[in-house]
Amino acid sequence: MPRTKGNHEARRRDVSEAVWRVLAAHGFGGLTLRAVAAELGATTGLLTHYFPAKRDLVAYALDLLEQRSASRPRRAAGAGLSAVRAAMLDILPLTAEATDANRIWVSSWDAALADPALSGDHARRYAQGRDRLRDLVAAAQQLGELPAGDPARIAAGAQAFVLGLVVQALFAPTAFPPHRQVELLDDYLASLASPPVPHGDRTVPS
């Protein structure tokens, strides 16, 4: 039977699902052509039509991770600080699904750092995340919900905070359960919303 475009697209979907299942179960450390072939019930020879080398498979998996992350439902929020909060909550591992996705993200760092081109792609992804936060921060400043300051710098700090909290929650879930993550995030946002204390008004310990 001749291969049709429909058959090809269906096979690509099957391959994508197999790659995702391997990532969910083993992370990037367990992502190999053999593992994907076993998950797909196919031969590694078939997969070489899609991924001639391991690097091609890793690059595809990173793109797939980005697509899955971009397509997942987001919290609804109005403009201002509530939108900043919602965007940061969307990153945290507050549900089983979000925890699995974050485990895959963290496992991707080693694979990306090992390859300059993939590392550059990851840097671009995180830069885009900072840009989105920057725009939300700027909108909150315009509404008077955040004090004046460089929104790009504030966004960089917010991204660093939330990614650090992700790592802590993944490694110590009992110490950082969902409600504790939300509390820490709200504490952080409250500190951002508070006007800075003038240097002369700071209490100096005796």
Image (tube, rainbow, N blue to C red):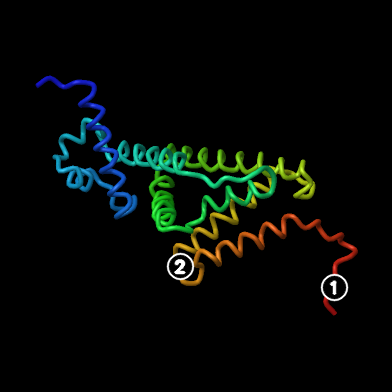
Disc 2 or disc 1, which is closer to the eye? 2
Residue 196 screen position, x and y as percent: 81, 57
Direction from residue 144 to residue 81 in the image, left or right: left
> What SS does tag 1 mark?
loop
Quadrant for the N terminus, please. Answer: top left
Q: What amino acid is found at the position of numbered circle 1 in the picture?
A: Val
Write the residue at 47% across / 57% down.
Answer: 93
Do the residues under discs 2 and 1 have CB atoms within 8 angstroms?
Answer: no
Write the residue at 72% across / 55% down.
Answer: 192
Q: Looking at this rendering, what residue extends furthest in the right direction?
A: 200
Q: Identify the image quadrant of residue 161.
A: bottom right
Write the residue at 37% across / 39% down.
Answer: 64
Mark 2 and mark 1 lie on one chain; the one further toward the N terminus is: 2
Residue 157 screen position, x and y as percent: 64, 52
Residue 114 screen position, x and y as percent: 40, 46
> What SS does tag 2 mark?
loop
Q: What amino acid is found at the position of numbered circle 2 in the picture?
A: Pro
Quadrant for the C terminus, please. Answer: bottom right
Direction from residue 74 to residue 64 in the image, left or right: left
Per the rendering, the mark at residue 111 is none
Direction from residue 167 to residue 40 in the image, left or right: left
Q: Which residue is mark 2?
A: 173
Q: Which residue is mark 1?
A: 204
Q: How many marks?
A: 2
Q: Callout 2 environment at 10 Å: few (<14), some (14 to 19), or many (20+)?
A: some
Front-most of residues 15 and 119? 15
Residue 6 in the image: above or below residue 190: above
Residue 43 screen position, x and y as percent: 14, 40
